[in-house]
Amino acid sequence: MIKYQGLIEIDLMVNGNLERVSLYPHETLLNVLREKIGLTGSKKGCENGDCGACTVLLDGLPIKSCMVLAVEVGQKAITTIEGLDDTVIQNTFIEETGFQCGFCTAGFIVNSFALLSSNPEADEAEKRTWLKSNLCRCTGYEGIINAVNKAQEKIVQK
Amino acid sequence: MNSNPFTYYKPESKEELVHLIDELGNLKKTYALYAGGTELVTMFRQGKGLVDAIIDLKGINELTQVVKSEKSVIIGAAVPLNQVIESVNNSAIQEALRAIADHTVRNKLTIGGNICGRLPYREAILPMLCRHAEVTVLEKGELVSYPIDKIFDKRLKLSPNAVLWTIKIGTQEMDFEKSQRYSATTEIDYPITHQYVAINEEKVMIALSGYSSFPISSSFDYEMLKASDDRLAFLMAPFVEHAKSDDRSSAEYRLALLKVCMEDVLEELSDKMRLNDREGQND
């Protein structure tokens, strides 16, 4: 049985790198990524699981890192926005200006990456279901949708 | 940031879990069972529900698995809702579960957490109630099974230190089965009312969440519905007095939504199940 109490050290696999971090069991994955590992791409928005700005991948599945304890993901592969550099979806967000203030962008890109990895031929209903997990307070949804559709076209063509 | 300095435990077997719960009890330590954690982590951040220990159930295989058979599935209490949706080959159940939270949260939010959580909606219970699911509970070191309607009354009534283990639910086709959900503003919000109706030639089963302060359900013979002179009033009768008013909706609006839903049900039944066929008369 695993037992963690007080300040502990654990290993986290983040973007393919093994990171040894000191943390308390109550610390969220979001906090550890930002404050202990220095990966600030995942944003602290609502901290309530509503906005999706903190979305990261755990073994390829999108999750909201503000609602996850870091101690429970020690065995899993964590992918943050920093791990998606120069991906098709990142580039189409730039090409289609799929952002305004940019605060929500990392969450949208991570979630869209997972969607198109899981089902490159996702239809409109499925894309809508997935993307409803993220909020853009600038309401820049048109550019976001265009970016996802363009990435999907490129991925399917490949 | 969450500032609850608890101890984290992750047992890997039923025996370890039983021993741990006993040990924490002897030490007079408070604990919370932790599966998806979506509710608990948020509560801890707000300084609510603070405990000495959390017990992560995801180390126990039986709690994280879905076992499928021809006519049913047995779902571990710590299985995330998206995994349940993928495993249950029944569109009405899938629709009811897809209405809970959002897609990303459902990768973490578990079926046991939704049913046993502190939020009053517990929408995952709706198809379980209508399909008379069987729940298995770990209590006093033993696994004991109950029909869900014997153990669910406003909430799942578990004895102290008991743990929801698995849920067995039938997946066979019903003659009529439908989930309808209304929220105040966006789709991803708590429900004003979430209505689940399942009907076969013997029984009519209706369960509601969001409509009153807790999930409620009713079940009666299909023949009674058929014989009723005012079927709409008959379907609504068990629920009328339970409509609540809150900042999302008035009781009158909830009643109106229930009426619309039940009218839809009656209309579809008249086509599908020849509801209007009376003895010696087809109309």
Image (spheres, rainbow, N blue to C red):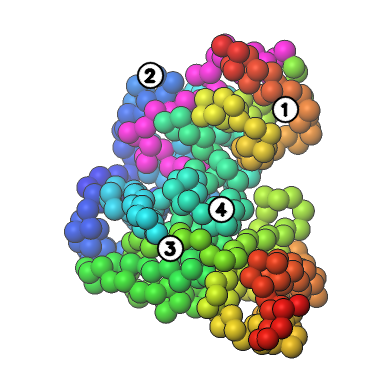
Q: Amino acid at mark 3?
A: Gly
Q: Residue B170 has which mark?
A: 3
Q: Are marks 2 and 1 in contact (CB under 8 Å)?
A: no
- Give a yes or no on whether discs 3 and 1 share a subunit: no
Q: Mark 2 or 1, which is nearer the eye?
A: 1
Q: Mark 2 or 4, which is nearer the eye?
A: 4
Q: Label 3 lies in what chain?
A: B
**Magenta stretch in the rendered image:** A66-95
Comes first in the chain, label 2 or label 1? 2
- Give a yes or no on whether discs 2 and 3 share a subunit: no
C-alpha distance separating marks 2 and 4 = 41 Å
C-alpha distance separating marks 2 and 1 = 31 Å
- Give a yes or no on whether discs 2 and 4 share a subunit: no
Relative height, residue B250 to residue A134 (above, below)? below
Q: Are marks 4 and 3 in contact (CB under 8 Å)?
A: no
C-alpha distance separating marks 2 and 3 = 44 Å
C-alpha distance separating marks 4 and 3 = 13 Å
Q: Which element type, helix, strand or loop, lies under badge 3?
A: strand
Q: Nearer the viewer, residue B255 or B175?
A: B175
Report the residue at 59% width, 64% height from top.
B177
Q: Position of residue A68 (x, y in %)?
A: 46, 42
Q: Amino acid at mark 2?
A: Asn
Report the residue at 75% width, 18% height from top.
A97
Q: Are marks 2 and 4 in contact (CB under 8 Å)?
A: no
Q: Residues within 10 Å of mark 3 (few under 14, many from 20)?
A: some
